[in-house]
Amino acid sequence: MARITLDKLAHSYKPDPQGPQDYALREVDHVWRQGGAYALLGPSGCGKTTLLNIISGLVVPTRGRILFDDVDVSRQPTEARNIAQVFQFPVVYDTMTVRENLAFPLVNRGVERKLIEARVAEIAGLLDLTSALDRKASRLGADAKQKISLGRGLVRPDVAAILFDEPLTVIDPHLKWQLRSMLKELHRKLDLTMIYVTHDQTEALTFADTVVVMHEGGVVQTGTPEELFQHPAHTFVGHFIGSPGMNILPCAVEGTQALVAGQPVALARRYPALSGQIELGIRPEYAALRQRGEGLPARISRIDDIGRARIARVELGGLKFSVMVPDEAEFDGDEASLQLDPAQIHIYRDGHLVQGEALAAGGQP
Amino acid sequence: MKPVNQKAWLLVLPVLLIVAFSAVIPLMTVVNYSVQDSFGNNQFFWNGLGWFSELLDPKSDLGSRFYDSLWRNLAFSGIILAIEIPLGIVVALSMPRQGWTVSATLVLMALPLLIPWNVVGTIWQIFARGDIGLFGAAVNALGIDFNYVANPLAAWFTIIVMDVWHWTSLVALLCYAGLKSIPDAYYQAARIDGASRWAVFRTIQLPKMSRVLLIAVLLRFMDSFMIYTEPFVVTGGGPGNSTTFLSIELVKLALGQFDLGKAAALSIVYNLIILSVCWVFYTVMTAADARADADAGRV
Amino acid sequence: MSLVLDNVGLARGGQDLLSGISLTLPKGSLNVLLGATLAGKTSLMRLMAGLDAPSTGRILVGGTDVTGQPVQKRNVAMVYQQFINYPAMSVYENIASPLRVARLPASEIDARVKNAAALLRLEPYLARKPLELSGGQQQRTAIARALVKRAELVLLDEPLANLDYKLREELREELPRIFAESGAIFVYATTEPSEALLLGGNTAALFQGRLTQFGPTAEVFRRPRDLTTAQVFSDPPLNTLSGVKQGDQVALSTGATVAAEGAFAGVPDGPYTIGFRAHHLALDRPPAAAFALPATVSVSEITGSESYVHLDLGAHRLIALVPGVRRLEPGQAVTAWLDPRRLFLFDDSGGLAAALAKAA
């Protein structure tokens, strides 16, 4: 059990890094509390795997330190760190039974046999593996194998943190649901620090209390799923989180009004004069599609039915825009208009969120 | 299901013809010889299973020669397997996994495999000579009497060392290929689980190598069981009959004494032994494959 | 040119990998094979391609029996889960490779490659080597190579499975347009119901080597023929309860009762399995007629815009997908609401007995 401190961590795979472009991981400074559920979310090549490897001890950081509680472990080997890891592809010891697999880390550490038996039985119960204990691990499905990998971490009473490296990649969709909710239950029961690396926003957001969004080697935002969804600090977060992602439209802003594709859009905050690349962001969930004449004129190119909802792909003066439409809504032809909820509109300058000044209640002109 | 296009058989025909000439006809001749007796000048007489019963009777001259060389062969195969397989594994484990040294090592390892059999024999014949051979002279200089022409133990030692030198790299290369296919995550997981070097070998590396190891054992067994050229070049089967293996015995019978019937019977039995060993390996391997498939959930 | 599978089966080592599959895929159609790992998707595609011959049944292309005809003789292109490109060739040469094999004139090759590159937004990368590209671009290259051949049949075996979530989303959105412009028969295998829905076209639901339903995607989703299809085509998993119909009422195992009106009135009395999807289970009382299900929260997962709430109802575990952020503590008692029009009634044998919702 441990608090993990990332102290000005940075890493470059080049021997002599020059500028920030040479760093696979740019400076990261964070404290992860004991018992927290964290996710590192980002596309391939964003540096999340480098960060994970630094935590697990596979990579020694170029700069900075990593501390477990107050101990600097930056240069300690993996086996000295008391971490457990679940990999993308299930790792089980093929020739062993499930029981032997679970006991393996304890046997290696010379734990007393009685204690091992009790601990293995306890963890097998937690993971719902009791009935499979005497089967060969290699004969089980991918989901059971991932549980075994996790179990080998959980049996160790001294484990400081459990790292998950895209653990659900090879799991069928309906089993993902079971494993995910099991992970959440385990996290609650066991009070362990868990760090989950993934490119899949649903997995990251549902698993973690705190999500660290990474992009091009740096952390762009750290927050709860709700914060990331409601107040993306960067257009990348807006785009990456949410399905479909946030609509990001180039615009001009003047006071409490934005100009998008030549059309005025009311804002709920007042902004100073801005220079640079100004963009307006709004999530598809906070826009509404109406009959022509009730908002910004738009043209429907397509409506996708995703089962639980429908997504209209529309064009707004040549700009692409996605908007959620209710099940029962019907439209004649492709002419429609868009209504944007002013309270849910964010303004970005060069990709970064601009905090406008809140208007007095009901003070919208 | 629609019948498959029968014209495909025409394509196989040339191969069938070649195989008929190169294998089936000689084989039938051998079977023919094995049930006949000849007194030279191309006169043949029916002898039934006479040669076979003589061959398998340990009290007859032919039988005792057959059993002696058979045991020699089995002992030789057993010894070289016992050395080459573990040694090959150890070499494979200590080979580099990345960097420029990998290709250098691979080339070096492959060198003995590229040398023709008789050249290998000649190299060792000279190398192990007590007077001018580097190896033989060195051993003699240590005060050990080493003379493979006179001393059976020295002769055996020489051909075993020769075979180990010649073929261990094959085992090592096969094992290396097996080791390379193990994903890094396994090693990382083992480190996290606190596994010792020995535990990593026993629980990860050995199971993942088991298939290639089986192939290596089969190849080395077959090849050593049929060995001819190298001991023929080095010792010629001597001193005495101490390194006369089945193949050398066979050549002595057929070409030395021109006992075609006896030689034919011996070669058929020889062949049957090899075929049955192959069959055992084949069954074990397919059973292992089926198990692996079932494990992977394929079937 | 249509592809017809007539009662096709495949047996290996005494086990049926596929059995009794009949499908008609018309020219220019997009067909999704939906099923879990090992459901038989890849086996079926291999039969369609001619890589394997079926043990039973026939395969017809444009009315001609091609059963047992090898892949070389068929006009087929395939895209795999792994990004398979020639690493030593440029993207341009990769896309051109099937045309070079076919010995087309250089001008024709150039025109077709440029066209495919434009369709898949690969124009800026034509001179690069595949390994210098992102995963998404590599897979676009493989798709372009499949399209440029103008094959009659293009098979895609989980082509997006190895891509990042966002790249997947992007390609999923583009693929229907790309397919529509080609005119070939597309067969697309996936394990994900959401992917089938986004692609549209037709969906064939596969379960343990059997075809459980084939039809327009929205129709298969909204009116599954049986319990198995509904389960295959639900993500989050289909919620099920048991119930007994007696007279004008259906009594659920949870104690609630539903009036057996409309289509439900016509089914015979007896036990049924009642299925419904996660997004139809509400935690706020909906305006429409709904009945209450008292439940206990087991886990709630929040995505920022939606919450997945796992509920325990006696022995049943249900999932509710509700909009907005719901912070619910495990063990907390809640009331879930369910609109009877969203229910499917499945009989003893798993067949759909009745549903009140319209098909499409």
Image: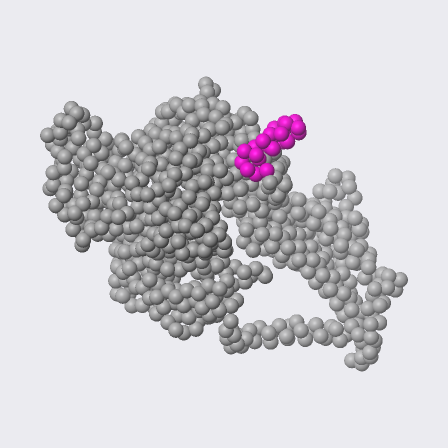
Question: In the displayed structure, would residue B96 be above or below residue B260?
Answer: above
Question: In the displayed structure, would residue C184 be above or below residue A71?
Answer: below
Asked if the magenta segment contains residue A127, the reply would be yes
Name which residue lies at 16% across and 47% down.
A291
Residue C173 x/y as whole percent: 30, 50
Residue B54 visible (yes or no): yes
Name which residue lies at 55% across and 37% down.
A128
The C terminus of chain B appears in which quarter of the rendering? Answer: bottom right
Q: Main secondary structure of the magenta part?
A: helix
B151 and A224: which is toward the camera: A224
> For this view, does B278 lie left or right of residue C325?
right
> For this view, does A32 lie left or right of residue A135?
left
> For this view, does A240 lie left or right of residue A197?
left
Name which residue lies at 77% across and 74% down.
B33
Residue B31 x/y as whole percent: 75, 73
Residue A15 visible (yes or no): no
A9 and A38: which is toward the camera: A38
Question: In the displayed structure, would residue C183 be above or below residue B46?
Answer: above
List the single residue furthest toward the top: A70
> For this view, does A364 lie left or right of residue C183?
left
C148 and B136: which is toward the camera: C148
Q: Which residues are magenta?
A: A105-130
Asked if the magenta segment contains residue A274, the reply would be no
Residue A259 x/y as whole percent: 12, 38
- For the rendered model, the colour scheme is one colour
